[in-house]
Image (cartoon, rainbow, N blue to C red):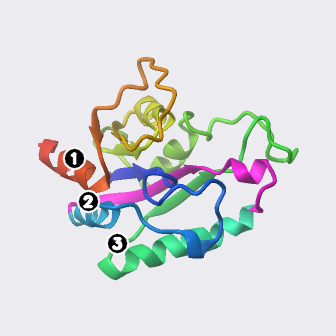
Amino acid sequence: MNKAVFIDKDGTLIHDIPYNVNPSLISLQEGALDGLQLLKANGFLLVVITNQAGIAHGYFQEKALEAVQEKIRQLLKPRGVHLSGFYYCPHHPLGKSREYAIECDCRKPGTGMILEAADHLDIDLSRSWMIGDILHDIEAGNKAGCHTILINNGNETEWIMNEYRKPHYMADNIRQAADFILNVLP
């Protein structure tokens, strides 16, 4: 089975511009490319796991995410970094669009996207990591059976804790997270 690093998109992998689907505004966070390159070189699959409530709220169409995915892939490509998957949740229970205004198990802190990726990509969750910038990311990863790292960049503002919202490590960026992951491997 494969090992993977699941990565939140907005605020973790790329700069967070709320509900942005304009590829020209997308840029990688500091340390993201270096960290992902290290993880990929050490045998990890790289999988984006992202809530995209803007679809449910009617801010953009689901199809608009195709250009976002392509832009991210192009930003990673020069260093040979390839994403094995890009999973997103278009739902929000308070959304305007009836089709997407539902309670679901894929929206983080739910585990649906992680479990779907694990099934599709033959991932051993006990050997895998979830990296995110808010505690919903950490909760999803912990509930799914992954190790977790919180990118402590100020995006988490609530700090409401429970047994699943405690990260295994806190880092400033994906590069620091990668260094930690590679140093704790057996």
Alpha-carbon span between mark 3 and mark 2: 9 Å
Q: Which image quadrant for residue 147?
A: top left
Where residue 173 sits: x, y (%)?
31, 51
User: Mark 1 is on which residue type?
Assistant: Ile
| Nearest to N terminus: mark 3 or mark 2 | 2
| Nearest to N terminus: mark 3 or mark 1 | 3
Q: In the image, which residues are magenta?
A: 42-61
Where residue 40 sits: x, y (%)?
28, 64
Q: Nearer the viewer, residue 44 or 123?
A: 44
Secondary structure beneath dot 3 equals loop
Secondary structure beneath dot 2 equals helix
User: Mark 3 is on which residue type?
Assistant: Val
Residue beneath disc 1: 181
Residue beneath disc 2: 39
Residue positioned 84% across, 47% down in the render: 99
Alpha-carbon span between mark 1 and mark 2: 8 Å
Q: Nearer the viewer, residue 1 or 109?
A: 109
Residue 81, numbered circle: 3
Residue positioned 53% across, 36% down in the render: 111
Residue 58, numbered circle: none
Where residue 38 sits: x, y (%)?
22, 63
Alpha-carbon span between mark 3 and mark 1: 17 Å
Say how many tags the image has. Answer: 3
Left of 24 or right of it: where is 179?
A: left
Asked if marks 3 and 2 touch (Cβ < 8 Å), the reply is no
Crowd around label 3: few <14 · some 14–19 · many ≥20 (10 Å):
many
Residue positioned 34% across, 72% down in the render: 81
Given the current orientation, which residue lies at the most extreme bottom position?
78
